[in-house]
Amino acid sequence: MSEHLTVVDHPLVQHKLTKMRDKNAPTNEFRQLLKEISHLLAYEATRDLPTTTTRIDTPVCEMEAPVLAGKKLALVSILRAGNGLLDGILDLIPSARVGFVGLYRDEETLQPVKYYFKVPTTLEDRVTIAVDPMLATGNSSVAAIDMLKEAGAKNIIFMCLLASPEGVALMKEKHPDVRIVTAALDDKLNDKGYIVPGLGDAGDRMFGTK
């Protein structure tokens, strides 16, 4: 645990993650578990949201009650696998604004290339939560955060299911102001850039593609 990295080691998160890691987990179960874990990760990611108070009447008396302050959150899915986390967060924060970042890897340069970018306005005034199940090499995540900052975002949280030490190190180097919230910090990357022990390709497992 550090200011830069939060590993959510809650027993429910770890239990559900173990079921997702199992290669025999069917697509529908994998997708449902991802949505359930996203609820729990979002709870931690939003712990420090600013609040103010409003005057309400309870059935018993008047009171000053806490409510979220400022503009609505921006949730940004890094396509395509980020949508699995996005759906779960929207269950908790249905009024959030939503954006999407589409990236693919150039097979010659191995660098991420943007093919789609659409995000809410006035990001500078919003807490922005960027979501992608895997923080592996970190290249795509860093590129997505670059784009969000260029669009004005100043208060960014990166939420993922699994992270590698290599990915965390790169994000800390390139974006030390961005907090990472994840369910697990795994051992390493293999020579194909997959997280080990990991759970394979999250997008393929979520959508049933290969």
Image: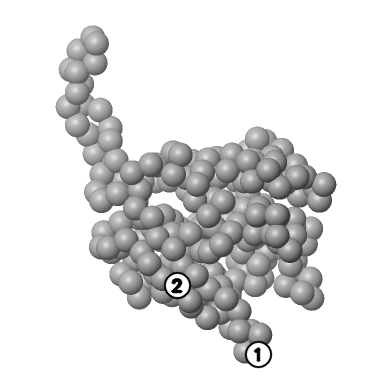
Q: Name the residue type under label 1.
A: Glu
Whole-angstrom CA distance, mark 1 to mark 2, is 20 Å
Foreground pick, 3 / 59: 59
The picture places residue 15, in percent across and down from the top left corner, at: 71, 38
* Residue 33 at least partly seen: yes
Foreground pick, 32 / 165: 32
Q: Kindly identify the residue that appears in the image at 27 percent across and 63 percent down.
A: 121
Quarter of the image where one finds residue 122: bottom left
Q: What is the secondary structure assignment of the residue under circle 2?
A: strand
Q: Nearer the N terminus, badge 1 or badge 2?
A: 1
Tag 1 residue: 108
Taking the image as shown, residue 42 lies to the left or right of residue 54, namely right
Does 143 sit above or below residue 51?
below
Q: What is the secondary structure assignment of the residue under circle 1?
A: loop
Q: Kindly identify the residue that appears in the image at 75 percent across and 45 percent down.
A: 26
Number of disc labels:
2
Quarter of the image where one finds residue 9: top right
Does 179 sit above or below residue 22?
below
Tag 2 residue: 116
